[in-house]
Image (cartoon, grey):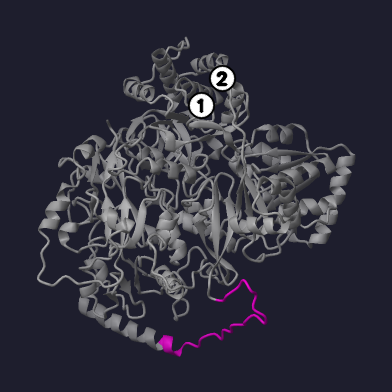
Amino acid sequence: MSEENKYWHILEEFEPIKDARLPNGREEVVSPVSRRNFLKVLGLGTASAALIASCTKKPVEKAIPYFIKPEEITPGKAAYYASSYFNQNEFCNVLVKVRDNRPIKLEPNPKSAITPNGTSGRVQASVLDVYNINRFQGPQKEGAPIDWESADNKIVEQLRELANAGRPIVLITPTIISPSTKKLIAEFAETFGAEWQQYDAIPMDGYREANKRVFGTDALPEYHFEKADCIVSVGCDFLGTWLSPVEFSAQYASRRDLHKENPDLHKHYQIEAGMSLTGSNADIRIRADRSEYGKILAYIYNSLATQKGFPAIASDIPAPAVAAELDNVVADLAASEGNSLVICGDNNPDYQVIVNGINQVLKNIGKTVGFERTYNHFRGTEKWKDTLLNAEPGAVIVWDANPVYNHPESDKIKAAIQKAPLSVAISSLPDETSELCHYVFPSPGYLECWDDAEYKKGVVSVMQPTLHKLFDSRQAQESLLKWMGNETAWREYIKSHWVSNYFQLQNEQTNTDRFWVEILRNGELTGKVEPTSVSFDETELGKAFRSIATEKPAQGFTIELTENINIGTGHGPLNPWLQECPDPVTRIAWDNYASIAPSTARELGIINGDIIRTGNLTIPAFVQPGQAAKTISIAVGYGRTAGVPQELVTGVNAYQLAKLDNGFRQFCADGFNIEKTGEHEDMALVQGHQSMEGRPIVREATLDEWKKDPAAGNEMHEKVEHHHTTLYKEHEYKGHKWGMAIDLNKCTGCSACVLACNTENNIPVVGKKEVKRAHEMHWIRIDRYYNGEEENPEVVRQPVMCQHCDNAPCENVCPVAATNHSSEGLNQMAYNRCIGTRYCNNNCPYKVRRFNWLDYTGSDAIPNNRYDPANLTLDLPRMRHNPDVTVRAKGVIEKCSFCVQRIQEKKLTAKSEGRPLQDGELQPACQQACPSDAIVFGDLNDPNSKVSQMMKDPRNYHLLEELHTLPSVGYLTKIRNKS
């Protein structure tokens, strides 16, 4: 790491700091109340609170035991059930942790063939969806309650009349990956002559069309990032939101695991307009306007074809503006023939044809791009819209889809649904589409359901309910069975399908009942697939080049629509955990915004939070380093209003800016202008709330530097260690001494750890207003630092939690010993002793302690003292609490505990089994959720433990180690491959 490197949090820090005492733009507030009078009032208030608490009558609570205890239930002990998470655009095999019949946490299923190593933040937060108080609580007709029998009779009667009259019956769903459900829908369609159409909010039909044209197969291939020595991604956020990010994160991180036995890294080029999560992790990022993607791909193909002896495609496509930077990309790809991978995030089939051509030239097909275990996801097309708008259907059944919100032609769709004689919405939550339907049939959440899934060919998973249905809801499959007159229970239907189709794929069980029980226990079955070879149709390349050559030069600004890693396609706004988790790039929570380049902002006189108008959207602007000059990036998924409480309504709906091009939805368009409205709104930007500015926080080096010196970029560590002296005898930790190591080279910043910590440790939601005041309560934050010029900086991320220092500055300033040190090296909190002086907070150099400024949890004894913008203190959402972790009240400091409840649980288990704890057996929530295996926890007293080995790595250092706080958390330097 060069001494000249200057790291900065936010754009304001890029310029010299004018006032070291206060952040720019803030004024010191002088209180009219003197310190003496303040302390008088404080004393009176504290005494009054104690008096009220002592006099408050506690409600009578009764624990009613089982009359006969079920064999599989032990009160107070967690049970785990194998299941799967699938929410339109993301899949993950999980283990559901259930306490006393309440699902409270999701963990990765280590037996999964797809996602054995971690989850995403959305998976972690989905447990809160089960306890959403805004869910439909029973069937409705025209907005009024109706009983199931009456509703079923009317539906069946109308369906039969429409079928006999020859009127089209249309069933619209998102992509269905359940084999059993596909079979059932086929039976339903045959019974009523219905037409089934699949629709995805963010489609990939352009990819499938390109593969059909070039390879003759309508398939999405599997990608092997772990096999690629050189990755070139053009506008594709494969670590954040593209196709299978949890799976890809694990593959990607496996090639960033740097040590002396594995001294090489893959090389990652990212070519993009807006700074994405994937782009911020790239070794080399090339900034290019969104309108240039077609030219870039054509340039790469022809350059490679020329080098590899293939004929170049003659065309009038001009060279892209970044052609000079692409020559190094082409050279590295050519040197990695057969071990490289090129992908593109655009749904334009012509672009994908050229991507296929590049991978074909590089001989990647069958190696890093495979067609054996193809993805069954993203089968939605635009055919459903043509049927809906042109066929005048008699019945429209919309199952868990919301096209009135997330389709650019929503007005036409809305009119068509309203025109249909029968419209039915099957959904768990109100949305913009269900509001228009005659009937609403509430469906339970996925943790209340039976189902199965085949996300990848030959890998079949099961889903099973982990609690009884909370409301009067019914699975959509049960409704279809009912309407068909089939009395088979849906659970038995699935079991029958598995026995008929998958029992013969295994040889471990000879009894079908035992086979089914084993499937429920493991959650998955992986069958064999035949090797698949594909042939390449070169004539399609010429067609794609000719199509790109006809593209007109972009006019004005180009808007690209992106997907926020937390909010997704539009389900996230209903989940306050996801709303409050900041975007990993911009570090903004609770909003979407228009990201513009710093040069554009200066030219137009725009600063962060200025309200601008572009197209028909009025939206705050955010000046994003690394943004292409003529491209504006806006995240979709916001602006939901139907069924969303007012306090959770955030942002604007950007789906309306998508366009249809030759039957394919595109998420970019040009011809836009930027107009200042003169209004301003401060956004909930969390970066800089806990600043450690001006100190060597993150350390990095290049791969070539590391090969010469394994301590490259970390030279300061040895100097600091050499000067560590103390007047006190070093404390000896007998038994365990817990510690954590974090590899900055493998951390992608996906935020899975943040949301896993929220779930495990009952972290409260404080709302947008409080986040703006720097009162967010996350125990772990992921700091994002820029390095370099504002137009295209490099990015480094660093997860920061309590460092559990051996010389903890927080401990000796607490007047009541509420924070103290355990015999195993943990910096621990006694909540009932804490009186809220916040001395520990002020004395913590890492700024990792959180103070409950208000009663965010409903734990105070004082009535009407609650601040709950997300309604999470009501009885139903409180069911998600982990009973092993204290729910904190107003006036109490809290912080990372290294998941001490998990430490105690594993210690007791090992003791009862008469054995020592094994290395890796104990994982805090953040480590267990991390898909890239960047976090390692263990016993520092065990010299053979993985965490001990990482602490001895020359790349290891500690935060602010020059302060001699002796943290128990180590960081391994970031290494970039720029060779």
In the image, the segment drawn in magenta is 52-75
Helix, strand or loop at mark 1: loop
Q: Position of 362 compared to 629: left or right?
A: right
Q: Is residue 864 visible?
A: yes
Query: Residue shown at 26%/52% (left/top)?
Result: 25
Confirm whether residue 429 shows in the render. no
| Residue type indicated by callout 1 | Ile
- The residue tagged 1 is 365
> Mark 2 is on which residue type?
Phe
Please indicate whether residue 687 sits to the left or right of residue 185 in the image. left
Question: Does the CB distance between marks 1 and 2 fall below 8 Å?
Answer: yes
Q: Is residue 763 left or right of residue 397?
A: left
Residue 766: where, in percent of width, then height? Answer: 43, 63
Mark closer to the chain start, 1 or 2: 1
In percent of width and height, residue 640 lies at 56, 49
Q: Who's the residue at 46% across and 51% down the image?
A: 117
Q: Which residue is mark 2?
A: 536
Of helix, strand and loop, which one carries label 2?
loop
Residue 836 in the image, given as x and y percentages of width and height: 31, 75
